[in-house]
Image (spheres, rainbow, N blue to C red):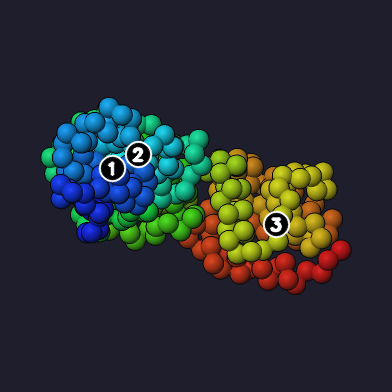
């Protein structure tokens, strides 16, 4: 179901009807401050009472038949309201699902809210409705809201996003370990004719993986370092006349990330190795990290990094 039904037992007045304020509060408190007209009617509130509450501003319309309770907008209220408006056969999807599953910053929140509906179709202002089949194992709940899984979200984005946007989404999802390649490949086998499936399969199975920009590669590496609770390195600092990606100065360790566009040519490869030689002669140890290690072999990578930091004496 798109929302939660109120528990039994609200107070009732002399006319035998449930207390409107109590019913509304119970629902809104566990649905991010939003309720649907259908839920309130099902709970026993007369339509005339609801109309008066709307007129009085107690219920503030968000979509047709969906209301916000009070003036404060809760963090997940937009997504909750969108699913309530589209019915029980719906889930937040596409970029909106990525925003919720990936825990992206608020300034990346998509507008309007993307929702996939797999039975029926209802258009609403402020909601971008996608009509598609969704299996049970392709939907999860985040804070009580139906949302497509990370694997299904990538499949949806493959037919909707640009190639560069898709690369970034795949890299982010894999590096954060929100999804594994096998989960994505199973969905691709389930939907072999979906738009964008060939490109998504290539990104998942390709030897090089998505092409990351320098800042994206650095962000993913730092995310792993922080999760492993390793010492935080300096980023993009000058050492022996070169700017390096990461530096643990007191440990004499430099880490360079390969696999993003900046390191794509043969000439650049040769320059990188000559630079490594200079750094080593200056007393630093250099570790190079590939995209494949960053995403698919993060545990062994962090193990090597931890051993290197532990074995090198402080200067």
**Residue at image mark 3:** 232
Residue with the mark numbered 1: 35
Residue 212 horizontal/vertical position (percent) = 53, 43
Quarter of the image where the C terminus is located = bottom right
Instruction: Please say if 33 is above or below 125.
Output: below
- From the top left corner, tell me how far across and down residue 74 is, in percent: 42, 42
Question: Can residue 244 be seen in this snapshot?
Answer: yes
Residue depicted at 79% across the width and 63% down the height: 251
Q: Distance between the residues labelled 2 and 1?
A: 7 Å
Disc 2 to disc 1: CB gap under 8 Å: yes
Disc on res. 69 = 2
Labels 3 and 1 touching (C-beta < 8 A):
no
Give the mark, 3 or 2, whose residue is nearer the N terminus.
2
Looking at the image, tell me whether mark 3 or mark 1 is earlier in sequence order. 1
Compare marks 2 and 1 and give the one earlier in the sequence. Answer: 1
Secondary structure, mark 1, is strand
Percent position (x, y) of residue 52? Answer: 24, 31
User: Can the viewer see residue 2 in this picture?
Assistant: no
What secondary structure is marked by label 3? loop
Pointer 1 local density, CA inside 10 Å: few below 14, some 14–19, many at least 20: many
Marks 3 and 2: CB-CB under 8 Å? no
Q: Please, which residue is most extreme toward the front here? A: 14
* Relative to 75, residue 273 above or below: below
- The residue sitting at 64% across, 41% down in the picture is 267
Q: In this view, does 313 lie above or below 280?
A: below
User: Disc 3 or disc 2, which is closer to the eye?
Assistant: 2
């Amino acid at each position: 179901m798109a929302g939660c039904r109120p528990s039994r037992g609200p107070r009732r007045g002399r006319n035998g009807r449930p207390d409107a304020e109590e019913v509304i509060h119970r629902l809104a408190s566990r649905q991010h401050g939003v309720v649907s007209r259908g839920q309130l009617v099902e709970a026993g509130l007369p339509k005339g009472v609801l109309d008066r509450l709307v007129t009085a501003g107690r219920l503030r319309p968000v979509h047709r038949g969906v209301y916000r309770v009070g003036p404060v907008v809760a963090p997940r209220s937009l997504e909750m309201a969108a699913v309530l408006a589209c019915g029980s056969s719906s889930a937040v999807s596409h970029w909106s699902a990525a925003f919720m599953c990936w825990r992206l910053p608020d300034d990346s929140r998509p507008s309007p809210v993307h929702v996939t509906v797999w039975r029926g179709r209802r258009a609403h202002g402020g909601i971008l409705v996608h009509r598609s089949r969704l299996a049970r194992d392709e939907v999860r709940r985040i804070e009580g809201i139906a949302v497509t899984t990370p694997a299904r979200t990538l499949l949806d984005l493959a037919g909707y996003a640009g190639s560069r946007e898709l690369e970034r989404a795949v890299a982010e999802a894999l590096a954060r370990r929100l999804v594994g390649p096998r989960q994505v490949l199973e969905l691709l086998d389930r939907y072999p004719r979906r738009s964008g499936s060939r490109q998504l399969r290539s990104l998942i199975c390709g030897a090089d993986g998505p092409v990351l920009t320098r800042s994206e590669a650095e962000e993913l590496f730092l995310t792993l370092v922080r999760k492993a609770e390793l010492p935080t390195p300096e980023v993009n600092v000058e050492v022996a006349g070169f700017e390096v990606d990461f530096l643990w100065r007191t440990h004499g360790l430099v880490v360079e990330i390969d696999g993003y566009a900046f390191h794509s040519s043969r000439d650049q490869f040769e320059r990188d190795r000559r630079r490594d030689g200079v750094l080593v002669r200056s007393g630093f140890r250099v570790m190079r990290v590939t995209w494949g290690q960053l995403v698919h072999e993060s545990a062994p990578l962090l193990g090597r990094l931890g051993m290197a930091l532990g074995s090198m004496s402080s200067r």
